[in-house]
Image: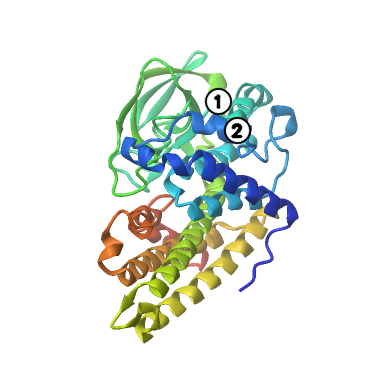
Amino acid sequence: MQRDLYEADHDAFRETVRAFLDREVVPHLDKWDAAGIVDRGLFATAGKAGLLGMEVPEQYGGGGVDDFRFNAVIGEEAARAGAAAAGLGITLHNDIALPYFLRYCTEEQRDRWLPGIVSGELITAIAMTEPGIGSDLASMSTTALRDGDHYVVNGAKTFITNGINADLVITAVKTDPAQRHKGMSLLIIERGMPGFERGRNLDKLGQHAQDTAELSFTDVAVPVTNLLGDEGQGFLQLVANLPQERLSIALSAVAAARVALEQTLEYVRARKAFGQPIGAFQNSKFVLAEIATEVDIAQQYVDRGIRLLNAGELTADDAAKAKWWCTELQGRVMDRCLQLHGGYGYMTEYPIARAFADARITRIYGGTTEIMKEIIGKSLGL
């Protein structure tokens, strides 16, 4: 089904993004996969190309364009290039971390951080998850206790995307440990603060080029001027930003599924068995017909979600619907496309193998499928 989401400016931006990925990312994918991390210089290069902070006001070096369609182009093109893992750091920087700086920073904080975020000199991350608590954020044990003009932070976080490369970590803490949701606040913890340590760069099933780290905080003195917004507002700030994060994950999931479909169509047309292309068999036709239909339907929902986000009307439950459905679809598509590749699909030299491994996490990060269904169930009054 033909899409009508994009306009000429987005098409021109897509060409820029595609050329950037082909030039600066694709040649290094194997090296970054093996290293478990992209070069920090990738962010500075992306900043110079105008791919970071598109919605940041021009006075801070950004593009001044508040239009999530540009973000969507980056996600789609990263999938097309087979660079979803390498591109995830940029997506997190733009789609997930940046809104916190734009919505909650004071003018002094904007002056201090936004230019570096746009240039790629300051890499961002967000640290919510802790060992042992998963989605139960209100039970976090990382504390930030006020001591004069500083908070003293103690605790640990895990599964933090950009955790090794990050310079600015939006960290969910308890400024009032006696409270649950109302005791949460957000602090920016910066690279080099004494007591802030990076643990392991975690060895994952997929998404190998993306650094995912353990972080620890031991008596880290964080200036009060690094508080985002007001004390006790952290949970509400997280809830307000999660719909965009979840839509970002959904659009990347659909893009990855579409690429897998295109690659599999090419494969089944060329691969022969029993004297004919395997795409000529009824089972292949039916499987690919089902995939094509589901991807097109999911794409329409995601495109509608992007329009709603731009209009400030995307709800938490609609974003949750997009997130769980599209990531589950991504998993089904990868599995069925790999099956149509036969034994070759299990070989890592074929893109479908990497896509299959990379896809598994999307049903977990950003809120598990089960949590998404909880959100939707509550919206139904259940």
Marks 1,2: beta carbons within 8 A: yes
Residue 230, x across and y down, in percent: 57, 31
Whether residue 17 is visible to the viewer of this picture, yes or no, is yes
* Residue type at numbered disc 2: Gly
* Residue type at numbered disc 1: Glu
Which quarter of the rendered picture does the N terminus lie within? bottom right
The residue furthest bottom is 282
Q: Residue at x 70, y 28 (%)?
A: 60
Residue 301, x across and y down, in percent: 58, 67
| Mark 1 secondary-structure assignment | loop
Q: Nearer the viewer, residue 382 or 76?
A: 76
Q: Nearer the viewer, residue 151 or 130?
A: 130
Q: Residues within 10 Å of mark 2 (few under 14, many from 20)?
A: many
Q: Is residue 58 left or right of residue 127?
A: right
**Residue 162 figure quarter:** top left
Residue 222, x across and y down, in percent: 47, 19
Q: Residue at x 53, y 61 (%)?
A: 317
**CA separation, marks 1 and 2?**
8 Å
The residue furthest front is 275
| Mark 2 secondary-structure assignment | helix
Q: Residue at x 54, y 72 (%)?
A: 297
**Residue 327 figure quarter:** bottom left
Q: Which residue is disc 1 drawn over?
A: 121
Q: Which residue is disc 2 drawn over?
A: 47
Q: Is residue 123 above or below residue 357?
A: above
Q: Residues within 10 Å of mark 1 (few under 14, many from 20)?
A: some
